Image (cartoon, grey):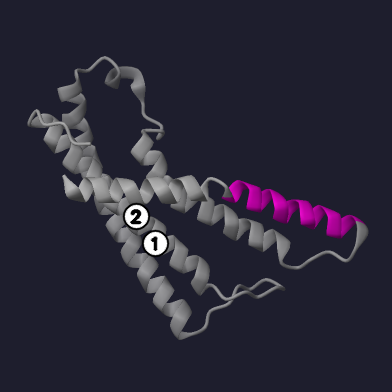
């Protein structure tokens, strides 16, 4: 299916790029340690590291889902047939889709608030919040699309069709 291939391609490429954000976080935290030891402490380092972690986590989530790297309770699941797994996955992903839809709605509302009122963090650095909230909405949207792609894949499996 074209939808599944497009979503998979976007999330794969973005996930491969975002996995290097760990080095961005390391660099920020290394600078934080150096500046606290030898210079004046930087106000921005801790919060910027948190923003980098949010981007790493939320933009990498769809990639992890695509690779099947999510945690699954394997007590019973592991012994089921592929068709049984597809039934359970197709059913449970509906809860994830609902959750992500609600999360995206709230994220968009929060982003709109941040843009309208020029929301800033209450920290000493006081960065604007719209960039990180935009990334969060993008990550939630991509996760929602990946969950829908997984549902399509599970339905195809139930019908005996292989979707790449």
Does 12 appear above or below 75?
Answer: below
Query: At which x and y percent is residue 137?
Result: 39, 63
Figure quadrant of residue 49:
bottom right
Q: Badge 1 is on which residue?
A: 138
For label 1, the SS is: helix
Query: At which x and y percent is residue 143?
Result: 34, 51
Residue at position x 28%, y 21% from top?
Answer: 77
Look at the image and tell me in which quarter the C terminus lies: top left
Q: Which residue lies furthest to the left in this view?
A: 159
Residue at position x 85%, y 60% from top?
Answer: 35
Does 81 appear above or below 14?
Answer: above
Look at the image and tell me in which quarter the N terminus lies: top left
Q: Badge 2 is on which residue?
A: 142
Q: What is the spatial separation of the Cα atoms under label 2 and label 1, in whole angstroms? A: 6 Å
Does 91 appear above or below 24?
Answer: above
For label 2, the SS is: helix
Q: Is residue 154 left or right of residue 13?
A: left
Q: Which residue lies furthest to the top in this view?
A: 79
Q: Is residue 81 left or right of residue 65?
A: left
Residue at position x 42%, y 72% from top?
Answer: 110
Residue at position x 34%, y 18% from top?
Answer: 75
Start-end of magenta stretch: 21-37
Figure quadrant of residue 88:
top left
Neighbours of disc 1 within 10 Å: few (<14), some (14-19), many (20+): some
Q: Is residue 106 left or right of residue 5?
A: right
Q: Which residue lies furthest to the bottom in this view?
A: 117
Judge whether residue 99 is colored magenta: no
Judge whether residue 27 is colored magenta: yes
Mark seen at residue 61: none
Query: At which x and y percent is residue 59?
Result: 45, 52
CB-based contact (under 8 Å), mark 2 and mark 1: yes
Majority SS type along the magenta span = helix
């Amino acid at each position: 299916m074209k939808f599944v291939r497009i979503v998979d391609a976007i999330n794969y490429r973005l996930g491969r790029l975002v996995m290097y954000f760990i080095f961005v976080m390391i660099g920020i935290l290394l600078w934080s340690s150096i500046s606290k030891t030898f210079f004046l402490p930087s106000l921005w380092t801790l919060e910027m590291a948190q923003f980098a972690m949010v981007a790493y986590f939320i933009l990498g989530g769809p990639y992890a889902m695509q690779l099947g790297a999510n945690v699954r309770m394997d007590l019973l699941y592991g012994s089921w047939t592929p068709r049984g797994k597809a039934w359970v996955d197709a059913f449970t992903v509906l809860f994830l889709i609902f959750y992500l839809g609600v999360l995206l709605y709230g994220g968009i509302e929060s982003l709109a608030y941040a843009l309208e009122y020029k929301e800033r963090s209450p920290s000493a650095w006081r960065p604007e919040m719209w960039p990180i909230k935009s990334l969060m909405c993008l990550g939630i949207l991509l996760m929602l699309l990946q969950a829908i792609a997984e549902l399509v894949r599970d339905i195809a499996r139930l019908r005996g069709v292989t979707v790449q």
